[in-house]
Structures are given as C-alpha cells and as structure tokens.
C-alpha cells in the first residue's frame, strides 16, 4: 500500500473501545441477560462475539448486542483469535468458575509468550495440559485454595479476568497480587464492574469483594478507544488538522492520558463540548519531550512518530513492555523507522529519538502488528516520498476504518 506525504483535514470517529468491549463480553458471558451498546468491528471484537454466540443466544440489533440464555456447560472451548486479553482472562475465569476449558488461538498469539498463565497454574495448583509458554492449553476443574496468588508483573490481563470471574463464582476469593503493571487497565476493569453494581476493596496487595455481588445494571455502553485515537491525534499534530469523534473525556481507559500530555507540552489540541465531545488536533511545533510509557505501552508507537517530528531529542522510557506484543515492538519500531530515515537509538529501557531531520520514506513492514502499521502510516504524512507498507490489513485487529484518514 502506497501512502503519500500530504496535509490532511479530516473528521473521523475513533473506533469503539476494544478494551471496554472485551471486558463487557466477559461480564455478559457470566450473566443471565446483558446488553452491550456500540460493538466495535475489529477482529478482536469478532472473536469475543463468536464466543458469546457459541455459549448463549446472542443477537445484534441497531449496534446493540443482546446476550441471554447462557448455555451452562462443564466443558468449554474458547477460540480467542489473536486476543491475548481474551486468552488470559478466560483462563482466569475458567479457574475460579471451576470449568474444564480448552483455550486456542490463531495468528501471532500462537507464538506469543504467555508464561504468566502457566505461572498462575503452578502457584494455585491448577491442573493443565499444554506446552508452556504457548497456546493451546487445557485446564481442568481444580480445587483452588483461598487466597488466589498472582504475579501481574508481566501483564494485568489475568488479574482483570480474575476480578470479573470472582464476582460470579460460587465461592468468592481474595486475590493476592503484590506486583501489578498497567494499573490503569485494572482500574478500567474495576470501573466497569462498579457500573453493574460490583465493588472491590484493595488492601495490603489484595483484592476482595466489598459487597454481596448482585447485578444492579444489565447494560454497558462502549465509548471511543483512546489508544487508537492517539494515532489520529498525532496525524493532526504533524500534518494538518484532525477532528476526532466518539471519545469520552471521563473515560477510565488509561491511554486517555495522551491528550493531557500533548496539551501539557503546548501542542494545538482543543475540545468542543456540545451535544457530543469533539477533540481537535492541528499542526504544531513539537518540542522535544520525555514520557514514561511503563504503564502505557500502546502509546509508544504514536509517541515515536511525535518524537520524530519534534525539534530536538526526545526520550520515551519504559520500552521493555513492548517486547511481548503482536510483534517485538522494540525491534519493529527501531528497524522499520530506521529504514525510512529516522534516528532512533536504544538507551537502556528507553528510546532516544532525534527529531531534527525529515524522514526520507521507502518500503516498510507492519510486522503483522496493527500498531506498527498505524505508526508507519501516520509518519508517512510528513516524510519526503511516502512509504510502501505491506499487509495494511493488520490494522483490522483494532481499527479497520483507520485508512479513512488517508482518503
């Protein structure tokens, strides 16, 4: 796919949040009747909907997903596509619900290191069959003891699954978890549970239910995805103007921090509050900056593009979280952006990026990674000759309508 340098002036809707939707689907799977408003059209969302269709009467009308009449079984087979969140969370839910479950995957998730799942099994004496640290795996109904022990220093996704599953389990557990990364995504899970009436307390590195879990609300509305919107924001900031719809400024999605950051460093970003919220990002002089991305790994690709267009050297910290994604994003960002003229070096756990020269352009690879593809495409807007990108369909994992930005 050829992407040419250009000045853009677009209004575009951010996709509905993949993070919110997948959590809502897991809640729906455990409920008797549940409605989810605003269904994303991404591949990860499709994987979740297919699971719901397999184990419930699931219908979609006017972009509302109605899930009812859950088919209770002793044996489950969850095919998670390429969604690591679904895989980890359904492992955790199956464990606390006492299900016999097979977890399978496709694409990059088949070769992704999921060692934290197997560590969870060992810590809690859960019976399983599988070739650690990879999928597929099968776990058997096990007599899990209270409290549940979890190390969430690699990913918080297992913890999110435990928090959801524990609220619906016959016996509720205390979840001991002293090391947690991406705490913002845990907060998102807790916020969504709170919306339906489930409250957790957190004390001494342990989560426990604060109330008798009684569902008081059977509907969740999904808002726009701030992780995807970050690419749209950067597109406007480096090459014209982008007006972004669908976003919620009160969102618990951790990546909504991006808009606060770009305002803090003085970039042209404004919002309009009328009947709906609209975010407007316009071409700016970008100063060099520092950003600690330890808890915001999905923001690193758009931050790299922002840094390449800055007037000086920028530092993006906490890049170790990028190794075990759809690709090794440290190497993907370094290699692909170096090909087209970017000056990026790795300094310990950071990217040091010199933004003083315009990128040349050329042929690049998405590495079959949606966020790498979007970063390269946005960067092409302000390059000398544009880029030729392989596998543009990789964006379908999270943002199939992304290419409307360039039409």
Image: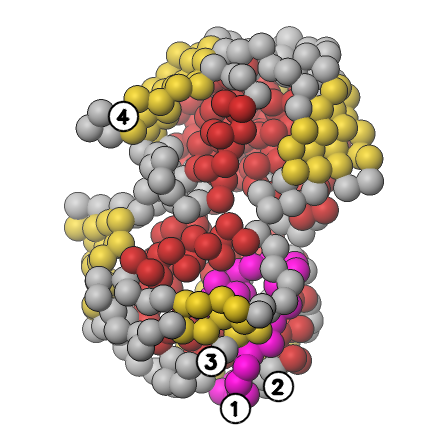
**Residue tagged 3:** 173
Which of the two labelled residues, at mark 2 and mark 4, occupies the earlier sequence position?
2
Q: Residue under label 1, please give it.
A: 143
Q: Let me know if residue 162 appears in the view.
A: no
Q: Is residue 68 left or right of residue 356?
A: left
The residue tagged 2 is 125
- The relative height of residue 218 versus residue 356 in the rendered view (above or below) is below
335 relative to 157, above or below: above
Kindly give the residue lying farthest to the front in the view shown: 203
Residue at (36, 40) in percent of width and height: 250
Q: Give above or below for 90 relative to 50.
A: below
Q: Distance from label 1 to label 4 (Cα)? A: 52 Å
Residue tagged by mark 4?
273
138 part of magenta stretch? yes
Identify which residue is drawn at 74% across, 20% down: 313
Distance in Å between CA atoms under marks 4 and 3? 43 Å
Q: Magenta segment, which residues?
A: 136-163
Mark 3 neighbour density, 10 Å: few (under 14) some (14–19) many (20 or more): many
Q: Position of residue 397 (x, y in %)?
A: 47, 44
- From the viewer's perspective, is 187 left or right of 312? left
Residue 111 lies in what quarter of the image? bottom right
Question: Of marks 1 and 4, which one's residue comes earlier in the chain?
Answer: 1
Rendered image: mark on residue 223: none
Q: Residues within 10 Å of mark 2 (few under 14, many from 20)?
A: few
Which residue is rendered at x = 68% and y = 19% of the image?
Answer: 288
């Amino acid at each position: 796919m050829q992407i040419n340098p250009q000045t853009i002036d677009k209004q575009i809707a951010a996709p509905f949040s993949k993070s919110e939707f997948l959590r809502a689907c897991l809640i729906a799977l455990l409920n008797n009747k549940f409605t989810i408003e605003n269904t994303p059209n991404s591949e990860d969302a499709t994987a979740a909907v297919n699971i719901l269709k397999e184990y419930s009467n699931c219908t979609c009308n006017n972009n509302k997903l109605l899930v009812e009449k859950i088919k209770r079984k002793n044996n489950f087979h969850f095919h998670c596509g390429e969604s690591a969140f679904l895989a980890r969370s359904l492992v955790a839910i199956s464990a606390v619900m006492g299900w016999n479950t097979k977890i399978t995957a496709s694409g990059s998730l088949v070769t992704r290191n999921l060692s934290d799942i197997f560590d969870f099994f060992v810590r809690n004496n859960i019976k399983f069959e599988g070739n650690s640290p990879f999928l597929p795996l099968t776990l058997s109904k096990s007599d899990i003891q209270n409290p549940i022990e979890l190390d969430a220093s690699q990913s918080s996704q297992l913890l999110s699954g435990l928090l959801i599953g524990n609220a619906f389990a016959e016996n509720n557990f205390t979840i001991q978890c002293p090391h947690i990364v991406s705490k913002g995504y845990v907060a998102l899970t807790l916020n969504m549970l709170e919306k339906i009436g489930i409250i957790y307390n957190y004390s001494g590195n342990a989560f426990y239910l604060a109330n008798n879990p009684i569902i008081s609300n059977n509907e969740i509305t999904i808002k726009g995805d701030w992780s995807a919107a970050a690419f749209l924001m950067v597109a406007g900031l480096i090459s014209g103007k982008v007006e972004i719809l669908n976003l919620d400024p009160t969102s618990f999605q951790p990546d909504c921090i991006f808009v606060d950051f770009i305002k803090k460093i003085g970039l042209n970003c404004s919002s309009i509050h009328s009947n709906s919220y609209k975010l407007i990002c316009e071409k700016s002089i970008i100063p060099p900056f520092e950003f600690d991305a330890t808890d915001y790994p999905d923001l690193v690709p758009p931050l790299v593009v922002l840094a390449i267009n800055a007037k000086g050297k920028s530092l993006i910290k906490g890049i170790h979280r990028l190794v075990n994604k759809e690709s090794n994003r440290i190497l993907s960002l370094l290699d692909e952006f170096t090909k087209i003229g970017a000056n990026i070096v790795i300094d310990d756990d950071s990217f040091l990026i010199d933004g003083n020269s315009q990128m040349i352009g050329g042929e690049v690879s998405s590495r079959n990674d949606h966020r790498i593809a979007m970063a390269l495409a946005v960067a092409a807007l302000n390059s000398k000759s544009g880029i030729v990108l392989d596998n543009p369909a990789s964006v379908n994992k999270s943002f199939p309508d992304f290419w409307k930005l360039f039409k």
